[in-house]
């Protein structure tokens, strides 16, 4: 089999398929290569407001209304209920002690809840990847991409003006020639193996994970006064040496897994259930419905991100940790940038800048996640550090919705002249009181969500008043913010903020 294309894409997860679909909309000849086949289990399932906005932007730029519907819970359920997913109203954290049932008081000392939306209709989502990825592959094929699944590429030659790939499919030789190669094959994927590109981590200790899909997971108890039902979110059980995620889909399946430092005590699922009785109660009637996946080395970075005629999407260049749901926005930002470069002829300077930005964003993510792992035995510090993420994410989303992306350069504001540098400083060890004060100072110019309001006791609802009151931080007026809120569905048309 011989295939000639303008762009070859290795990997047909959501990133590879979205890239193929967008390129086909511009008339680019695309071959999409998949080592396995769909539908399949995949980790990386939880979106964020910024990720959903980037999905909207991608859909609008490339005229993909069939993709735009997945950017909000309400439109997804009305347009594509056949594709399973889950409602994500925010981030829920519970902090546990070994051997003790979970307990808390009115100060919420052992909780953190940060809402991402004021109601379900514009809520974020969990992507049930067997359905979601399969749907995107079918869309790419329908748009004219050549799709080769169960194809093993054994050799890549990127030394010439183009790219030459050789492999096998169903016992037959496959020869692919393309002008450019995009690696969307995930951590320790195609080019990382071909060119031995794995790099040591800079800050994060080696972590491991074990995860699967379940049926019969009990819902976590909630009071009616919390910002949202805690299960309608990315639910995190934070332990002194690791954490567990619980993500619910609307097909009765729950994704759950444990991640911990390799040296930690909570290294296996059974360890966690044995040591934390409230978590054990939540899973007492649960049944795994997919094979367990064990990842002995979860985080991954590469030494290179691109070359003259190839580039990795962020999902192939670095996977840090699912702790803050950073994978989707990082990858979608990379897709937008790389598509623009390919449309402009894949200029060498542009590719070098793409590599620099991708590595800088992965650096910021890794440093913050490493600081959070170190702070897991210390809930107040952990919660304080997460506010760096929530401040940067909420500010970036609002700036982009106001068509002022220059106010928020880089993921986690990593390209901002003050925030980017200060985020790294806040992640370093130092006197506790000084660290807390420094984080507050760093956050304040970007806090548009009431994150520094102590009266909220670590429960942060999504309030229009917060955005309106902080309009000047976004170089906007109150009327600008009200128009944004109405346009985005945050408040109903003609309604009160």
Image (tube, rainbow, N blue to C red):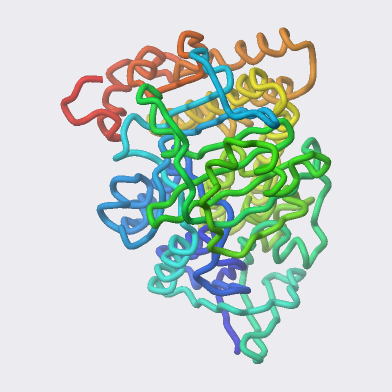
Q: Is residue 351 above or below residue 40?
A: above
Q: Position of residue 33 (x, y in %)?
A: 58, 73
Q: Is residue 69 left or right of residue 304?
A: left
As drawn, which residue projects farthest toward the left?
A: 494
* Near-viewer residue (411 or 440): 440
Task: Name the residue rendered at 75%, 61% in the picture.
Answer: 192
Q: Is residue 379 above or below residue 264?
A: above
Task: Name the residue rendered at 79%, 50% in the picture.
Answer: 303
Task: Name the residue rendered at 56%, 23% in the picture.
Answer: 103
Q: Is residue 363 left or right of residue 280?
A: right
Q: Is residue 91 visible?
A: yes
Q: Position of residue 160 (x, y in %)?
A: 74, 71
Q: Position of residue 330 (x, y in %)?
A: 58, 44
Task: Name the residue rendered at 64%, 15% in the picture.
Answer: 439
Q: Position of residue 134 (x, y in %)?
A: 46, 67
Q: Is residue 461 left or right of residue 6?
A: left
As drawn, which residue projects farthest toward the bottom?
A: 172
Q: Is residue 79 left or right of residue 23?
A: left
Q: Quadrant of the N terminus?
A: bottom right
């Amino acid at each position: 089999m011989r295939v000639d294309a303008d762009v070859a894409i290795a990997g047909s997860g959501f990133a590879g398929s979205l890239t193929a679909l967008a390129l086909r909309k511009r008339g680019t000849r695309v071959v999409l290569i998949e080592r396995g086949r769909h539908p399949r289990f995949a980790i990386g399932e939880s979106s964020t407001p910024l990720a959903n906005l980037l999905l909207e932007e991608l859909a609008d730029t490339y005229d993909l209304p069939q993709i735009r519907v997945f950017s909000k819970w309400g439109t997804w359920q009305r347009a594509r209920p056949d594709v399973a997913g889950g409602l994500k109203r925010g981030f829920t954290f519970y902090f546990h002690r070994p051997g003790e049932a979970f307990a808390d008081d009115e100060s919420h000392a052992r909780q953190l809840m940060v809402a991402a939306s004021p109601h379900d209709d514009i809520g974020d989502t969990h992507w049930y990847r067997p359905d979601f990825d399969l749907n995107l592959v079918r869309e790419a094929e329908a748009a004219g991409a050549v799709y080769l699944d169960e194809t093993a590429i054994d050799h890549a030659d990127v030394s010439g003006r183009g790219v030459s790939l050789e492999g096998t499919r169903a016992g037959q030789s496959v020869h692919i020639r393309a002008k450019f190669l995009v690696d969307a094959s995930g951590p320790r994927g195609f080019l990382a193996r071909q060119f031995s590109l794995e790099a040591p981590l800079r800050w994060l200790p080696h972590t491991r994970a074990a995860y699967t899909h379940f049926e019969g997971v009990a819902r976590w108890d909630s009071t009616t006064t919390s910002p949202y039902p805690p299960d309608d979110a990315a639910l995190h059980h934070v332990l002194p040496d690791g954490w567990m995620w619980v993500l619910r889909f609307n097909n009765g399946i729950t994704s759950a897994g444990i991640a911990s430092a390799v040296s930690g005590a909570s290294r296996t699922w059974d360890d966690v259930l044995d040591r934390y009785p409230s978590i054990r109660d939540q899973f007492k009637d649960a049944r795994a419905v997919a094979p367990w996946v064990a990842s002995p080395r979860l985080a991954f970075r590469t030494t290179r991100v691109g070359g003259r005629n190839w580039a990795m999407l962020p999902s192939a260049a670095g996977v840090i940790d699912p702790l803050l749901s950073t994978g989707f926005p990082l990858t979608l930002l990379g897709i937008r940038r790389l598509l623009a470069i390919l449309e402009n002829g894949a200029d060498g300077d542009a590719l070098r800048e793409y590599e620099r930005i991708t590595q800088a964003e992965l650096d910021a993510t890794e440093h913050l996640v490493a600081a959070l792992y170190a702070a897991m035995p210390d809930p107040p510090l952990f919660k304080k550090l997460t506010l760096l993420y929530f401040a940067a994410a909420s500010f970036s989303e609002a700036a982009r919705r106001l068509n002022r992306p220059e106010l928020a350069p880089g993921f986690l504001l990593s390209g901002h002249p003050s925030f980017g540098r200060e985020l790294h400083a806040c992640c370093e060890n130092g006197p506790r009181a000084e660290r807390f004060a420094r984080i507050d100072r760093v956050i304040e110019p970007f806090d548009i969500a009431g994150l520094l309001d102590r009266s909220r006791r670590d429960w942060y609802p999504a309030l229009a008043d917060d955005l309106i009151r902080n309009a000047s931080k976004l170089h906007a007026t109150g009327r600008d913010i009200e128009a944004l809120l109405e346009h985005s569905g945050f408040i109903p048309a003609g309604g009160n903020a």
